[in-house]
Image: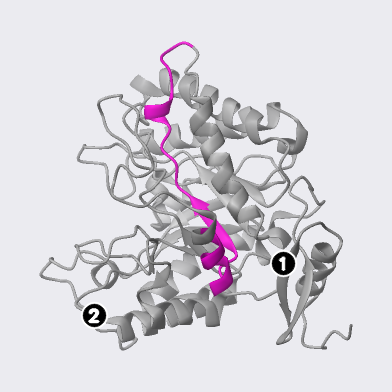
Amino acid sequence: MILKRSLSIAKIKRLLYICLSGILISLNVGGCAIKASAIDKTLMRDMKPKDLISEMGAGWNLGCSFEAYNTNNEPVSETKWGRPRTTRKMINAIHEKGFNVLRIPITWMNHMGSAPDYTVDKKWLKRVEKVVNYGLDNGMYVIINTHHEEYWRFPDYAHLESATDQHNKLWKQIAEHFKGYGDHLIFEGMNEPRLKDTEHEHGSGTEEARDCVNQLNMSFINTVRSTGGNNAKRLLLITSYGAIYSSKAMAAVEIPQDENIAVSIHAYTPYYFTFNPDNPESYSSWDGSHIDSIQNLFNDINEIFLGKDIPVIITEYGAVDKDGNHEDVSRWTADYLTLANEYGVPCVWWDNGSFKNDEAFGIFDRRKLEWVRQDVTDTIIQIAGKNE
């Protein structure tokens, strides 16, 4: 096999790693399709987070499936919010398109017992594991988290002790269950931890809330590390208050003394283009005149984290479909991901499976296994995808 000189060191390392493992998958090197082996799902390589993250490429969220919940403390299936049951064919199609990161947002509160043990339903854990394996079997990186848990994990001092207890017991069970998996499985401690249904829910929160989020980040790390096995070195993602990308929220993140962590941030920017089509300030065209909002995002990420050798993953980004403005969203995506690539920040598109309402972030029809906003998807893969 002759490797082209244009292959990066990271790609060569990735190729050698894949070739030493088990199951045959399709691989593309320098435009030439070959056959090689998929990852060893138990292997933990001695890689720094920055190097691990450099392998990731384009990411996709399995939104509104495993994160479905209700507040009645009743069991909830992954189809509760109208999304189809996740299948291997579905995840295969995601990977075949060129996505290399699968994030699975998961809400656990309807699948946990009461205090003091907060026992997680084993059937739910096994179902999550099955879908995790759909991604790993494709050689993808898979991120699992604890998603809509704000009803019990409320970040203020009055609730911190009880929230930390349940938070730790939940993560101990998840970590124990998955500790034999290798470094392609990543744990994300919290999703947008915030003061839900209060005046401070959005924005940068309060000083007290930011402190509580830092304490919960730290207890997440300590809990996972204490389970041993591959969890001793697994990449763990901590976050800011609300996962918000404001400089105030990001600067408040306390970075633990741990060699295998990165920061997870959500960044839908500029807001009035990417979101909220019914707002009077909303706009649907993209000519680059608002690109400073994206530049400021990455400048802040670089100053606060990357410049201090702290890697970052944007685990949610995207733009809603506003009356078919696909070309505009494609141009925005190109600007966004080009800057992300320059800074070495992988991004995971928020696909909630919705195509018509005011949060129409969907790009993939999970029932038909078809790409709905093909031009947007092609832009993602062209700029951020890694066919290796």
Q: Report the residue at 49% width, 36% height from top.
A: 214
Residue 21: give x, y in percent of width and height. 83, 58
Q: Magenta stretch containing residue 109, yes or no? A: yes
Q: Amino acid at mark 2?
A: Gly
Q: Which residue is mark 2?
A: 324
Residue 301 vertical placement versus 154 (above, below): below
Residue 345: give x, y in percent of width and height. 57, 66
Separation of residues labelled 1 and 2 (CA atoms): 36 Å
288 vs 312, left or right, is left
Identify the image quadrant of residue 222.
Answer: top right
Q: Tag 2: Cα neighbours inside 10 Å, few (<14), some, or many (≥20)?
A: few
Q: Amino acid at mark 1?
A: Ile
Magenta-colored span: 91-116
Residue 388: give x, y in percent of width and height. 70, 74
Q: Is residue 222 visible?
A: no
Q: Magenta stretch containing residue 257, yes or no? A: no
Identify the image quadrant of residue 130.
Answer: top right
Q: Which residue is mark 1?
A: 25
7 vs 103, left or right, is right
Q: Report the residue at 77% width, 87% height from top.
A: 6
Residue 273: give x, y in percent of width and height. 26, 73
